[in-house]
Image (spheres, rainbow, N blue to C red):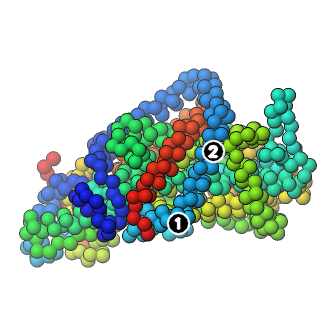
Amino acid sequence: MTDDPDNQGIPAPEGATEIIETDYTIGQDNVEGTLGPIGFDIHNPVFMISGITIVAFVFYTLALPEQAGDVFSWLFAQVTQGFDWFFLGAANIFVLFCLFLVVTPWGSVRLGGAEATPDYSYIGWFAMLFAAGMGIGLMFYGVSEPMSHFSTSLGGVSVGEDGVRTDWAPLGAAVGDQEAAIRLGMAATIFHWGLHPWAIYAVVALALALFSFNKGLPLTIRSAFYPILGDRVWGWWGHVIDTLAVFATLFGLATSLGFGATQANAGLNHLFGIPIGNTTEVILISVITAVALISVVRGLDGGVKILSEINMGLAFLLLAFTLIAGPTIAIMTGFADYLMAYIQNLTALSNPVGREDVNFSQGWTSFYWAWWISWSPFVGMFIARVSRGRTVREFVICVLLIPSLVSVLWMSVFGGVAIQQVVQDGYTAAQDADLPLQLFLMLEELPLASITSFIGIILVIVFFVTSSDSGSLVIDTITAGGKVDAPVPQRVFWCIFEGAVAIVLLLSAGGLASLQSMVISTGLPFTIVLLIMCWCILRGLMSEKRG
Amino acid sequence: MIPVDLGHVEALERALQVGADLAGHYGAEVHYVSVTGTAPSKIAHSPEEFREKLNRFAAAEAEARSIASTHAHTVISHDPSVDMDHQLCEAMDEIGADLVVMGSHIPHWYEFGSHGGKLAAHAHCSVMIVRDDTR
């Protein structure tokens, strides 16, 4: 049962999907050719403009580091502070929209058509979702964020001369009340890693999957805008959207890779005495890029999926060990308690207006939302690519609710153990240490520390690899005009290019920080993109056959 | 078995004709095999549509080249550029082909040329590489 592409009338009711009829053929803007022995197949404007813009920004940052730093941090401050209400409000809309889809009849629409079957098993699918979306963050912030919110909550509220709060505690803090501070701290952490970020990814992924697998449009960001822009989406409107996506993805990955190398270096130094410095970090980036290269050359099934599964296995091993070796009962009861705390504080934490806890809502929440949103084209497209065959309901439940639960579990265990170490044992070494070391210092207090820390380092490195390889695939697809079967050397190019940009920025003073600020600022235009996507998803679903 | 790239059929002309001639001579069936990804491509909006197109191609070939019996096999791959060789080998075993007639020189010759080589190395049956000399 298929759509007959020659039939220009109303598609037959047995049709599996409602293909959008457009004169645009995928690849019509592409340039194919060979460079010596290497074939290429690129989307003419997007590939070139992305490449040139990326190189231009890198040059600007290298040539005028101070000015670039000032400009980008000013931009970043304007965006995260000036538009915090916008980010918070938009993220709330995404969560509500996703939950709405679960309960409506549109939830029965199947991605890829009524006859499609899922491309991957649940395990493989989950592993890839996590590895692309959140792995690295959970490793580092899993320990540090709960402790940070706990101690700021305990410290209470402090108000400056102008009546504006100067503390960083969430909501009303919990001065002097340890139990309440723990609950508030955990609730605030779970809030940042729970429903809202996954809803952001789910919206993008759903839009891309729907318009590609059901409507037959190319697998690029621009396709989701067809209901609004019509055929203009193949012209400059679309070029701008796609280029911005490539730009945000590449710089997002490169800056993460650069910072990741610094963090891994700190970990390696702590564990094995490996010297901290540019040489080690460049070697780390090269190793990560090399492994990512092997992964992209082996492809989605043979490379990305296998690495993601290995990582998920190792991560759960570490989680289980920490749970068992740590104060197990406290954590298990804590899990339910922290989940309740999250639900109870959810409305207050996600409130976009009238916030008194400005440092928390702007410096943490708004920052995070902008960051997730700037990553959403990459993560969303990757999730879309591997989600064919799932119904919308299944998709939202599995991309929104289950990862949120896993995040709750993760934070409860790692953050909970760290906080208990401070509160019960008076062990503050982890709390006082630099961010990258906190995980390792927490593990040191548990048995088999050298083994667990080693596993931790491997996890961090492999999470970077899985971000890098899936990112390269996404950039490759967008710059090939939505083709997923472009010649392999192209994805090799993007993988290496990303590593090279990371190294260049790492070696420039302040380059990483300033470009990361700039990337997060792209979260602002993308928020508008995502809001429009919600509307387009609805339009798209309304014309689909259900179940 | 004839691997087919529906996007570059003109370049396969010679291989298709050779395959048709051999089939006629030995009274064999021709199986056209093509690998597609799950995302929309230049050729089709969906794997189902691709399957339809390959079926029509097989039927058209049967008529145009007077082949007694043709079949079409669509292989769906999660990552076509990388999985193609492996999946063509699998298709070979599934069909139980006696001979694979493979065209060489499609614009990305870097890929298809090596596909032919890999297939020949791993195939359990005969593999004939037909060069398209209309370069």
Q: Amino acid at mark 2?
A: Gly
- Position of A298 with respect to A372 (left or right) is left
Position of residue A331 measured from the top left corner of the image (x, y, whole percent)? 79, 64
Whether residue A454 is visible here, answered yes or no, is no
Whether residue A541 is visible here, answered yes or no, is yes
Residue beneath label 1, please?
A: A394
Image point (26%, 77%), residue name: B96
Both labels 1 and 2 in a single chain = yes
Position of residue B74 measured from the top left corner of the image (x, y, whole percent)? 29, 67
Image point (31%, 43%), residue name: A30
- Position of A196 with respect to A354 (left or right) is left
Which image quadrant for residue A493? top left
Task: Name the one closer to the observer, A364 or A417.
Answer: A364
Q: Is residue A78 above or below residue B16?
A: above
Residues under labels 1 and 2: Cα distance? Answer: 25 Å
Residue beneath label 2, please?
A: A89
**Mark number displayed over residue A327:** none
Which image quadrant for residue A258? top right
Q: Amino acid at mark 1?
A: Glu
- Position of A219 with respect to A191 (left or right) is left
